[in-house]
Every structure is written in C-alpha cells, then in structure tokens.
C-alpha cells in the first residue's frame, strides 16, 4: 500500500502543477457568478415575501334572517333561506350550519357571524311554525328565545384582475389537526430541515414505491411555496435549481410559522369555472360549504390529500380516486397518532360529503348586483371593491328573490298562448325599512345585461293617480274621501292651442262619484278634474320630492301617467305610502366590513315622518278599496283578500305597459310587464302585471296591512249622499277615515237620497272646457 501512494503522489503533484491556474481561475469565476446570483435571489425573496399581499375579492352577502315569535314564515321559505346559506339537513344538529325538520318544527344550529352590527354567537334553535308564522322560538333545551339571527347567504364575489378565491387565515385560526396532518403527509421534517430535506426525498421515494402510488411528496412545503409564489410550471433543471436556492434563502430569513401560514393561504386546491381556489379556508368553503373549524377528520384528510393533485383527485369528477386518496391520508394520520385506529376506521367509512356543485357564490342575481355596485360606487373606488377583501352585506332576502323569480316565470306562461318577446321587471322592498329584498330585471332572472327594473323608463299610466289624490287629501278643508267629484267629459286647451280630451278606459262617463271610488275605480275624467283643481305643478313637486333625480314634466297629461319612470323609481314613490307617510330611501347595501371584520360603513335608513302622514293614510285606505272592489278587486279571488293589501293598477296608451304597485303591512312590490320594442301587450294592469304580483304574494310570508288610525285620521260612519255622519245600520252607510277635526259635523239619519241634486246645487263654475296655464 505504501508503495502505491509513493507512486501516486508525484503524479498528483504533477497534475496540480499544470492545472492549478485553470483550477483557481474556474473557482474564482464560480464564486464571481454565485455572489450576484445569490444576491439576485435574495432580493427576489425579500421583495416577494416581505411585501406578500393578495388581491382579495370582496364578498357580497344577503341579509341575516331574523327569527322571532310571530314573524311571518312558512316551511318553504325557511328551507330556502337555510339552503341559500349552505346549511345541511341532518338527523341531529350537533354542528354549526346544520338543520333538521320534523313536521312543522325546524331545529337549527346557527353559525357565529358579524354582519356589521356586532358579533352573533353560535346558537341552537328550535323553530315551530303555525298559521304562516313562527309560533314558537326556543333553544334546543326548550327555553324561549326572544330574537335570533341566521348568518346570511353569500350571493356574489367581486374579483379583480385574477379570479382567485382566497380567504386569508392566521395560524391560530387553522385547526391543529389540519396543520399536523399536512406536515405528516407532505413534510414530516418541516421544523428540522433548512428548506431542502434530502432524507425526506429518500423516504418519500421508499414509501411511494411500497404503496404503489404517490402517498408522500418529496419536496418540502417551503419548496412547494416557492413554486407557487416565484416560479413558473415549466419542467427545467434551472427551475429546480432556483427552487432549491430560494427555499434555502426563505428559511434563512423567515420563521417556520411565517412560512407555514403563507403556505396555508397560497396552496392551490381546486377550480370552479374561472375561479381558482387557493388556501385551506377557501377549500373548506368550496368543497364542504363550511368553516375550517367545522371540518371533520375525513374532510381534513380530503383537503390535505388534494395538495398532490387537485385535478387528479377532484372529489366531484374522480370520486373513487378521491375516496382512495382520502383514506390513504387518514391512514397516515393514524400512523402519526393524530387520530386513533378506531377513528381512522370510522372516518374511512364516512361518505364523501362534498357539495354537488361548488359552494362559491356565482353572482346569481345580476339585477340586484347592479344596484349594489351602484350604491357602493358612490363610496368606494372599484379597485378597493375588487382587491381589498371587503365583506358587503346587502338587503336581499333569498326566499323573496326566489319567489319573485318564480312568479315572473310561472305567471307569464299563464297570460297568453304566445308570450314571445314579453318582458317583465319587479322590485320588492320591505315596507317599514326601505330595504330592497328582491329585484328581477329580466324574464330570465339569471341573464345579465339590460336591467329593466333599474334602467327601463316606461309610461306609468294610472300609477300616478294616488299622488294626485295625496295632494288633494293634504287639504282637508277642501277634500276628504267622501268629497263628490264630477266624472264627465272635459276638454283641456293647452298652450299653443293644443286640445286634450281624456277618456275613461271604458269610454263611459260615470257622473258624480265620491273621491274614494274615483281612485278605487281609476276614473280618468274625475282624476283629471281633481288634478287641475289642485294644480299639476303641485303633483309634479310631490313626485320629484319622493323620487330624487326624476324629471317630471308638469303637463296636464301627467295626471294620467304620461311620464316615464323605471320600476325602481315607481317603488321609491310608493315607498312613501307603504311606510305610512315616511320618507324612506330604498337601499340595497346595509354594511361594509374590511378584511379583518371591522365596520367601514353602516347604511341606515332615515325614519322621518313627512308632512302628509294623515293624507298618506287616507290614500292607503282608498287603495285598499281598490283591492277590495276596484280595478284590483280580483286579488280577493286569487286568495289574497286576507292581506288587506293596498294596490294600484296602471296601463299606458294602447296597452304598451302593464303595471301594478301594491303593498302589505311588511312588503311593497312594483311589477312592470311589456315589450322592449314598445309594441302592444294586450294586457291591462289588472290582467297582466297584477297576476305576477299575486304570484309573488301567494308564496311570500308577509304581514296584512293594518293602517294606523289610533290617532289621526279618525273613523266615522257617514252617508255619502247627504255628506253627513249617520248610523252604521243605515243603508249605504260607509265607515271612512277623516283627518282629525275635518269629519262632517252634520248628522243625518237614514233615508236621505238626494246626492246628485245636492252636488249640482253646489256647482258654480265647473264647465266642460278648461284652460290650462
């Protein structure tokens, strides 16, 4: 051996003598290249990781569902609300986000949430329904509960440039079982390696060979994070070299907790159409419709198993492979003593409880979202809405919206054999708050594009009449519901010599009628005479006050609805009447929270009574008469008499537009029916739009309309023939409201019948031709 080394050493010395210059030169060049290369990678890491931020989409939610004893509710509506909020029907409600049904009794385990007015805790509730209302509200122990809320459904997502679905979480928000399972399967030596794990690579190769498939990955979590954050997906030696170098630098600069948190928020775990699902929190919602802390061990195993291939193990398309992969991960969890052997067996027997379709909101309500974006656009730049992770809470009620959509689709089919080209729009709001609960902007409610509820300005026809009568009844010394009006032909000569001769829809004159009947039966001639008497300009000012931004022209034809308004604008005007004479702006957004759940804005409606409260109540009473015996009298035949609704039909010239506006004690709905090309529909308001309105209220849980007569106005039994008070038992006696202090002072017993003579004796200057200035 000594002889061997004696011979070899001189040879090595000779080789070094001749190669020392190239060797040192090469080493110097390598170092010279490595230093700037490492500096470049380090700068890349510091820029990318220190400033790590995500373009977080904003999430749009419906309103929370309020539950209380006596609130109108049906089993169908409650189920729609729960399913919209991704509640699962189960036998026993042990988990948040579940419900069970037995007869008319619902058991619900709500989720904790914050919709801008404070934190709502998780609750166990028992809701008993009866007679279209909540008969009992109790906790699961049977103790009465005064008020509770169900967390709102997520209805839409506002994305930025990239459609990445992501919900950022902190380490302490992730279940330890999920974190430990991820480490056991993907990176067992995470807390001991320095970014690269040679032993882990060797171990993964051995385990995968024994299993006959990929059970463990060779790359560390740090390397996987590097691939997602810094590198493309092309398979090249330089990419792997860069991946390892960046992983080493990240481990040198950042803590293990920081790296792991970034990974949990970045890892790609699936796809829904154009939406890429990143992070474990978004995956929990996407696959199971649940929060991270509500996941069962088998669901955690499913999510961790997807890391190796979201497409390969997609539980919706590759169910068998997904179950096999999940069970392998469960076995790894058992081997790592994260769960017991008994739990492994039990969890492997569980069905793959993945929602049939992605649980991510698909922006199903385009017409309503148009309004939401318009309202938000006044306070937030679009960039903030699409990248800052805001939570936007709205007023939409999923059950109301669905009932409205069904009413439009189903009822249009019953109107005529050929409904080609027929379009519709509907706006539904809460009478007392002005909160918009539903908007339908197209016969196909899911179709985005032209939003007829917001943007289609059409002639409103007789929908204008209640506001003419409002102006009149606000002058109680001149007008009351029993004031006689002349429904006879009239000629109005306008500026420039143009002559206008209005007619009634039945081409008849009805002589002398009392004011309440003129409105209930929608008599044009009586209304025009009344409008000219109170002045068209006053009607114009009232409408422009109630509908901010509306451009109303004070021509005499305004008195019969010759002005163009959208269904939303009409709803804004009628909201004044439905809200008992209160100025109530309609709104779609209730609150906006930042990504950390801190309130940025609260949108509250004003509750200021207007100057015409008593007059508004008289108009509502007259519109109830419309729904009882007037142009909307068929509502009773449609089973809606018990609602005591107030409503008004409207029809534009040549039946181009069919309208109905009506309200109950808790809901207002305005419906338009027509054609985009403005051709005839053949429908009046009563046999067109009103049928759609009825279709909604036949399903919608709502309060009957009870007008407040406790203070003002006051009810009196009167004889409209004698224009005096009378006894209830008299023939023709009517119980009508009067503004306090303005009821007729005279008393007349039964039998007086000279109404027309009495009225004619008071006519002094009411001619057949009127000049308008």
Image (cartoon, helix red, strand yellow):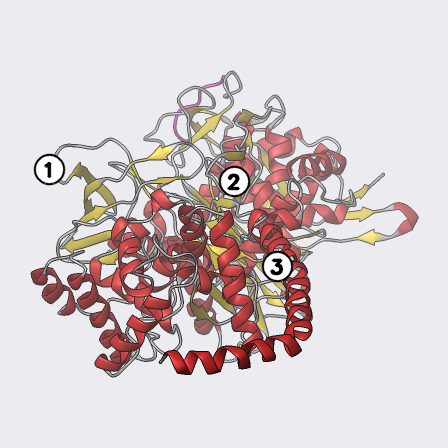
Query: Above or below — where is 424 with respect to 397?
Result: below
The image quarter containing residue 478 is: top right
Return the x and y of residue 755 as percentages of the image width and height: 53, 34
Return the x and y of residue 177 as percentages of the image width and height: 25, 53
Query: Above or below — where is 729 with respect to 95?
Result: above
Q: Nearer the viewer, residue 641 or 385?
A: 385
What is the C-alpha distance between the residues marked 1 and 3? 65 Å
In-image side of 128 versus 610 (left or right): left
Return the x and y of residue 16 as percentages of the image width and height: 60, 75
User: Is residue 463 in view from this perspective?
Assistant: no
Q: Nearer the viewer, residue 360 or 442?
A: 360
What is the C-alpha distance between the residues marked 2 and 3? 39 Å
Q: Residue at x 60, y 79 (%)?
A: 14
Residue that carries the numbered disc 1 in the rendered image: 141
Q: Residue at x 69, y 41 (%)?
A: 529
Q: Quadrant of the C terminus?
A: top right
Q: Nearer the viewer, residue 741 or 418?
A: 418
Q: Nearer the viewer, mark 2 or mark 1?
A: 2
């Amino acid at each position: 051996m000594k002889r061997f080394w004696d011979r070899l050493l001189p040879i090595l010395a000779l080789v070094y003598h001749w190669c020392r210059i190239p060797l040192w030169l090469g080493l110097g060049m390598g170092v010279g290249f490595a230093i700037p290369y490492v500096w470049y990678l380090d700068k890349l890491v510091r820029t990318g990781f220190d400033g790590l931020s995500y373009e977080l989409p904003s999430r749009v939610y419906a309103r929370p569902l309020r539950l209380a004893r006596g609130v109108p509710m049906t089993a169908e509506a409650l189920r729609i609300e729960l399913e919209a909020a991704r509640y699962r029907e189960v036998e026993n409600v042990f988990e948040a986000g579940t419900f069970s049904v037995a007869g008319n009794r619902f058991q619900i385990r709500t989720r904790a949430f914050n919709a801008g007015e404070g934190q709502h805790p998780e609750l166990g509730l028992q809701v008993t329904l009866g007679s279209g209302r909540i008969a009992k509200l109790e906790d699961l122990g049977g103790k009465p509960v005064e008020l509770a809320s169900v967390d709102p459904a997520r209805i839409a997502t506002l994305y930025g440039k990239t459609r990445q679905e992501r919900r950022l979480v902190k380490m302490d928000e992730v279940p330890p079982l999920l974190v430990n399972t991820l480490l056991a399967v993907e990176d067992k030596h995470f807390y001991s390696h320095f970014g690269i794990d040679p032993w882990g690579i060797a171990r993964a190769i051995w385990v995968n060979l024994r299993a006959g498939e990929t059970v463990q990955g060779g790359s560390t979590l740090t390397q996987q994070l590097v691939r997602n954050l810094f590198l493309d997906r092309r398979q090249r030696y330089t990419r792997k070299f860069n991946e390892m170098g960046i992983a080493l630098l990240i481990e040198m600069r950042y803590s293990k907790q920081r790296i792991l948190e970034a990974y949990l928020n970045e890892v790609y775990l699936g796809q829904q159409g154009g939406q890429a699902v990143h992070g474990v929190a978004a995956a929990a919602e996407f696959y199971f419709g649940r929060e991270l802390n509500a996941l069962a061990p088998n669901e955690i195993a499913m999510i961790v198993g997807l890391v190796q291939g979201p497409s390969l193990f997609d539980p919706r398309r590759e169910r068998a492979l997904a179950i096999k992969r999940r069970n392998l991960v469960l076995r790894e969890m058992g081997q790592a003593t994260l769960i017991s052997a008994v739990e492994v067996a039990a969890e492997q027997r569980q069905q793959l409880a993945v929602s049939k379709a992605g649980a991510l909101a698909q922006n199903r309500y385009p017409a309503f979202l148009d309004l939401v974006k318009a309202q938000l656009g006044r306070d937030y730049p679009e960039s903030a809405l699409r990248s800052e992770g805001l939570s936007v809470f709205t007023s939409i009620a999923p059950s109301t919206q669905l009932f409205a959509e069904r009413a439009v689709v189903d009822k249009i089919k019953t109107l005529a054999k050929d409904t080609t080209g027929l379009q519709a729009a509907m706006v539904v709001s809460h009478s007392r708050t002005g909160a918009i609960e539903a908007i339908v902007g197209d016969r196909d409610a899911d179709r985005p594009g032209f939003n007829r509820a917001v943007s289609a300005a059409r002639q409103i026809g007789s929908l204008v009449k209640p506001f003419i009568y409002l102006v009149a009844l606000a002058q109680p010394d001149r007008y009351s519901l029993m004031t006689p009006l002349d429904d006879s032909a009239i000629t109005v000569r306008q500026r420039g010599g143009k002559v206008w001769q209005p007619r009634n829809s039945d081409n008849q004159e009805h002589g002398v009628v009392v004011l309440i009947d003129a409105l209930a039966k929608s008599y044009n001639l009586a209304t025009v005479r009344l409008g000219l008497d109170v002045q068209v300009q006053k009607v114009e000012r009232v409408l422009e006050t109630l509908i901010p931004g509306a451009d109303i022209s004070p021509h005499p034809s305004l008195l019969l609805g010759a002005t163009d308004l959208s269904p939303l604008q009409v709803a804004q005007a009628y909201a004044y009447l439905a809200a008992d004479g209160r100025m109530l702006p309609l709104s779609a957004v209730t609150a906006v929270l930042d990504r950390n759940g801190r309130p940025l804005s609260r949108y509250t409606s004003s509750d200021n009574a207007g100057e015409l409260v008593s007059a508004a109540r008289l108009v509502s009473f007259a519109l109830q008469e419309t729904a009882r015996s007037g142009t909307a009298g068929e509502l009773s035949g449609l089973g809606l008499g018990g609602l005591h609704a107030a409503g008004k039909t409207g029809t534009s010239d040549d039946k181009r537009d069919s309208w109905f506006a009506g309200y109950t004690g808790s809901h207002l709905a305005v419906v338009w029916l027509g054609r985009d090309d403005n051709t005839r529909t053949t429908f009046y308001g009563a046999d067109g739009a009103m049928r759609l309105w009825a279709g909604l209220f036949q399903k919608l849980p709502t309060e009957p309309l009870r007008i407040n007569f406790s203070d003002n106005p006051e009810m009196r039994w009167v004889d409209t023939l004698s224009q005096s008070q009378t006894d209830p038992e008299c023939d023709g006696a009517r119980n009508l409201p009067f503004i306090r202090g303005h009821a007729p002072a005279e008393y007349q017993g039964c039998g007086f019948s000279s109404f027309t003579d009495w009225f004619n004796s008071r006519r002094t200057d009411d001619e057949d031709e009127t000049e308008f200035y």
